[in-house]
């Protein structure tokens, strides 16, 4: 055999040997699924329709937006942005008041909780991607006089 043919032949033999030994080593490794199993949605509390699990709600958005209606309601009800964030981060989703049908960017989450000054709020959040829009906020214990755009009298 001349040396011109010997070198490629030896390389092929080494490559085949490497592939066979690598295949044999991989047989003893545990099988790891390539995708995570589908998460099951938390079941809401039957009496309140709420759950403390996120179920798709991004509680740490990169950017917050507020509708004009939300800003007006926040003003009437003496609610600031810090309190809105507090509800987003620590509140409980009320599935009975949420709208989660259709495309993800059309979902609206009704999140309820208490602020540091004990105001019991429901805030409607509309997430889209890594951003969050505050649609409106409601004081669950007190009716405030308000005349905001979009109110029906």
Image (tube, rainbow, N blue to C red):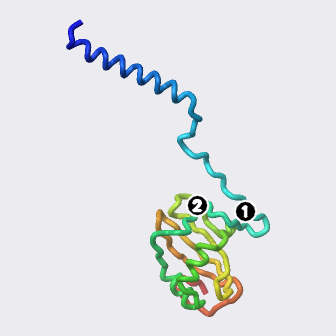
Other-residue count near label 2 (Cα within 10 Å), few / some / many at <14 / 14–19 / ≥20: few
| Quadrant hosting residue 110 | bottom right
Residue 43 location, x and y as percent? 72, 59
Seen from this angle, which residue lies furthest right? 47
Q: Which quarter of the rendered picture does the C terminus lie within?
A: bottom right
Residue beneath disc 2: 56
Dot 1 corresponds to which residue? 44
In the displayed structure, would residue 149 be above or below residue 31?
below
Are dots 2 and 1 in contact, CB under 8 Å?
A: no
Residue 143 bears which disc, if any? none
Q: Nearer the viewer, residue 63 or 140?
A: 63
SS for callout 1: loop
Name the residue at 36% across, 20% down.
14
Image coordinates of residue 83 in percent, x first then y, are 58, 82
Q: Position of residue 72 (x, y in %)?
A: 52, 87
Disc 1 residue crowd, few under 14, some 14–19, many 20+, Cα 10 Å: some
Mark 2 to mark 1 CA distance (whole Å): 14 Å
Furthest residue in direction top, as rendered: 1
């Amino acid at each position: 055999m001349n040396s011109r043919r010997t070198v490629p032949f030896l390389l092929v033999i080494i490559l085949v040997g490497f592939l066979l030994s690598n295949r044999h080593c991989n047989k003893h490794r545990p099988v790891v699924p390539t995708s995570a199993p589908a998460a099951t949605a938390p079941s809401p509390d039957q009496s309140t329709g709420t759950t403390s699990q996120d179920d798709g709600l991004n509680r740490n958005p990169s950017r917050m937006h507020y509708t004009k209606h939300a800003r007006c309601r926040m003003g009437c009800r003496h609610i600031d942005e810090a309190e809105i964030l507090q509800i987003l981060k620590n509140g409980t989703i009320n599935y009975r008041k949420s709208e989660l049908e259709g495309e993800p960017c059309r979902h609206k989450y009704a999140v309820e909780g208490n602020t540091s000054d004990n105001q019991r709020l429901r805030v409607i959040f509309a997430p889209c991607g890594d951003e969050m829009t505050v649609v409106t906020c409601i004081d669950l214990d007190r009716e405030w006089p308000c005349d905001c755009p979009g109110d029906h009298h």
